Image: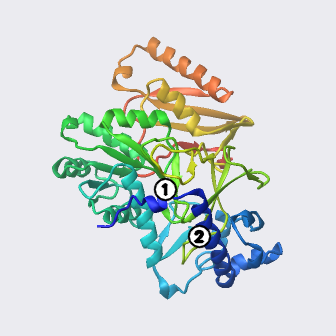
Amino acid sequence: MERYYQPEIECASQDQIRAWQDERLVKQVKNVYDHVEYYRNKMKEIGVEPGDIKSRDDLYKLPFLTKEDLRTAYPYGLLARPLSDCVRIQSTSGTTGRRVVAFYTQHDIDLWDECCARAIVAAGGTKEDVVHVCYGYGLFTGGPGLNGGSHKVGSLTLPMSSGNTERQIQFMTDLGSTILCCTPSYAAYLAESIIERGVRDQIKLKAGIFGAEAWTEEMRHDIEEKLGIKAYDIYGLTEISGPGVSFECSEQTGMHINEDHFIAEIIDPITGEVLPDGQKGELVFTSITKEAFPLLRYRTRDICVLSREKCSCGRTHVKMSKPMGRSDDMLIVKGVNVFPSQIETVLMNKGYPANYQIIVDRVNNSDTIEVQVEMTPEMFSDSLKQMSEREKELVNALKAMLGIYAKVKLVAPKTIARSEGKAVRVVDKRHLY
């Protein structure tokens, strides 16, 4: 069996990584210019030709792509290969506007599987493991991505998909699942359900690979404690390929980007200026090995930091921090920038479960924010006076974190709907007025 921890690639020198990126970028720019009219027109608008791009140092000369471009070019406008060369499509889970559809050749699928295999190996996975995949399958990339990566490693793969928690737990106990792959919110729900059923001692999980939504360090520690596992982050976008663009190693201080396939930049989200490593800004990706749907300088809207500090795992590929929020998902309430992750950090630090919802509204032309927080069964048995004190404590903690007043409403256990896919954390009613 082939190795999917590949020191010659994942531990390559910076000079080697740069040589790969320079060569592949030059070829990819010419490929896109020759075969994608939509992007060729964008390059012509700013007077850039393929010959102007000689290395990754010239990336800044290229125009950005955004999700709006993908929707405008839907469905085939960014396709760089004949449709007859494509073997699959995947699509985003977005519900507004035209859907984003990504295309894959068999070569693209093979490379995607390899990237996800690297993530599984970094989490300790081998061919001896049982990989329990309960990301959604179908058009969503989560299930197919980790499924393909697990096959590549040679692990026994359980393609469970999302939902039917009773069956998830039955297979987990009966078949001895050792690596769990799902969204962090569903992992938290599974942990809660496993403890309620009293089968915690029957679970053989050692690791979890969680992504597709934002989650905090506090949520990570809570899941790890309840399931007795090490929880690893994984990152990806349908537009770039899917999960496996980057992944955590045992050090858990950021996610290694597969730099032999993707070039990452950090830009100022307002000006578009490229920022140096170590500065916080918007993450931008360029696909340098994709065939069917190669995107150049795609703005992810995720806010993070890149670091090239030496990693104890031996991997040399650049690390990206866990996204700190999204430039387009950030809430502006009373003129203040609010990220849901800030609220989650406060709640988890105060011992509340990872089940909450943020309601933003407008009353008498003024923004309001309410945080509905689920209590634990122990908290629910508190007196009314104790609950009132808890609410005041959270109001003060949230004001210290956010800089604005947020109403807090403590609700009974199981009140907030559980998610088997991406959790709905924010309900913004202001657009209704």
Q: Residue furthest left?
A: 174
Q: Amino acid at mark 2?
A: Ile
- Mark 1 Cα-neighbour bin, 10 Å: few <14, some 14–19, many ≥20: some
Q: Is residue 371 left or right of residue 229?
A: right
The residue nearer to you, when weighing 341 against 424, is: 341
- Its colouring scheme is rainbow
Q: Give the CA distance from mark 1 to mark 2.
A: 19 Å
Query: Is residue 240 positioned above or below 192 on the image?
Result: below
Q: Amino acid at mark 1?
A: Cys
- Residue 72: % across, % down: 67, 72
Q: Is residue 181 visible?
A: yes
Query: Is residue 387 positioned above or below 79 on the image?
Result: above
Residue under the image location 41 percent in, 58 percent down: 118
Q: Which residue is mark 1?
A: 11
Q: Is residue 318 left or right of residue 356?
A: right
- Mark 2 Cα-neighbour bin, 10 Å: few <14, some 14–19, many ≥20: many
- Residue 365: % across, % down: 74, 37
Q: Which residue is mark 2?
A: 288
The residue nearer to you, when weighing 262 against 41, is: 262
Residue under the image location 75 percent in, 63 percent down: 60
The residue nearer to you, when weighing 304 against 302, is: 304
Residue under the image location 19 percent in, 36 percent down: 201
Image-quadrant location for residue 342: top right
Query: Is residue 115 positioned above or below 388 on the image?
Result: below
Image-quadrant location for residue 379: top left
Q: Nearer the viewer, mark 1 or mark 2?
A: 1
